């Protein structure tokens, strides 16, 4: 992707040391806006509830790689790190960004997965919010219908006692497909996003992990059900 190549030297330089992460985040925000401008992607916030004081957990459904590219410009003032599957490290350019800036989760290795959760907790205590797609992947079919959430994100939220911001993407799958597919879908359009009322710290503490998972799933899923 041309914009990735353009910003690669700048972001890589910022990520040489850990102190450069915040500067790198701001570059990612600028990159996201540049990507949107050049590719003609607008964002329509069909709901835009206020955000809590950070740090917090951001949880969204995952129907397209566009979800990732847009997040930085959707929440430009809420510094966050992605907690995501390690398979993304297969892409050479993205590997540099993701491994140094974010937190890869090796889902097939329990020890490495546990280390990723511990790392996420450490970053939250430094003031970073955590962005996660609780489905763990982009479902293979029936977009944007969601699959069951994995509970690791909600275990993390409860253990750290932090609020959760649920987000719904309803049509990104129609705008952009896998960037590795040369003939994949990619055309300009308006991404429709719902930023829901956050689940407060008190609610996170009060609800069981299963209740919290269901509460978040139902909140994110509601606009998707309205499409049917």
Image (cartoon, helix red, strand yellow):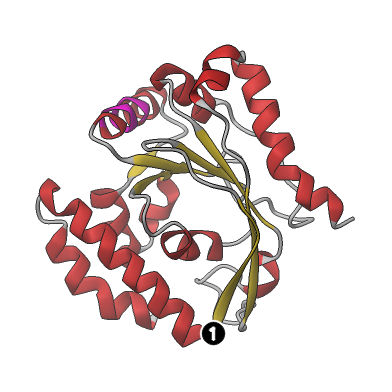
- Asked which quadrant contains residue 123, the reply is top left
Q: Secondary structure at mark 1?
A: loop
Main SS class of the magenta portion in the image: helix
Residue drawn at 36 percent across, 36 percent down? 55
How crowded pointer 1 is (Cα within 10 Å; few <14, some 14-19, many 20+) is rated as few
Residue assigned mark 1: 40
Asked whether residue 148 appears in the rendered view, the answer is no
Q: How many marks?
A: 1
Quadrant where the N terminus is found in the figure = bottom left
Q: In this image, 5 relative to 228: left or right?
A: left
Asked whether residue 48 appears in the rendered view, the answer is yes
Q: In this image, 179 relative to 100: left or right?
A: right
Residue drawn at 70 percent across, 71 percent down? 174
Q: Name the outermost residue toward the front.
A: 50
Quadrant where the C terminus is found in the figure = bottom right
> Residue 149, position in %: x, y?
64, 34
Residue drawn at 48 percent across, 78 percent down? 36
Say if 34 sits above or below 166 in the image.
below
> Residue 47, position in %: x, y?
66, 55
Q: In this image, 55 relative to 226: left or right?
A: left
Q: Which residues are magenta?
A: 117-122
Say if 213 sits above or below 55 in the image.
above
> Residue 103, position in %: x, y?
33, 42
Between 61 and 65, the one nearer to me in the picture: 61
> Residue 201, position in %: x, y?
49, 24
Q: In this image, 167 relative to 112: left or right?
A: right
- Asked which quadrant contains residue 9, the reply is bottom left
């Amino acid at each position: 992707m041309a914009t990735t190549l353009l910003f690669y030297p700048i972001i890589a330089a910022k990520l040489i040391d850990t102190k450069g992460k915040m500067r790198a985040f701001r570059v990612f925000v600028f990159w996201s806006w540049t990507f949107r401008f050049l590719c003609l992607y607008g964002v329509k916030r069909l709901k835009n509830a206020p955000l809590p004081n950070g740090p917090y957990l951001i949880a969204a459904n995952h129907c397209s790689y566009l979800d990732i590219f847009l997040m930085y410009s959707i929440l430009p003032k809420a510094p966050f790190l992605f907690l995501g599957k390690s398979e993304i490290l297969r892409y050479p350019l993205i590997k540099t960004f993701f491994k140094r800036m974010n937190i890869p989760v090796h889902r097939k290795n329990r020890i490495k997965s546990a280390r990723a959760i511990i790392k996420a907790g450490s970053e939250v205590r430094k003031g970073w919010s955590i962005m996660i797609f609780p489905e763990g992947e982009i479902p293979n079919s029936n977009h944007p219908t969601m699959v069951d959430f994995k509970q690791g994100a909600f275990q993390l939220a409860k253990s750290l006692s932090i609020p959760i911001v649920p987000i719904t993407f309803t049509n990104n799958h129609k705008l952009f497909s896998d960037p590795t597919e040369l003939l994949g879908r990619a055309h300009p359009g308006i991404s429709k996003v719902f930023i829901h009322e956050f689940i407060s710290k008190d609610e996170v503490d009060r609800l069981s992990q299963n209740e919290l998972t269901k509460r978040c799933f139902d909140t994110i899923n509601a606009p998707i059900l309205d499409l049917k």
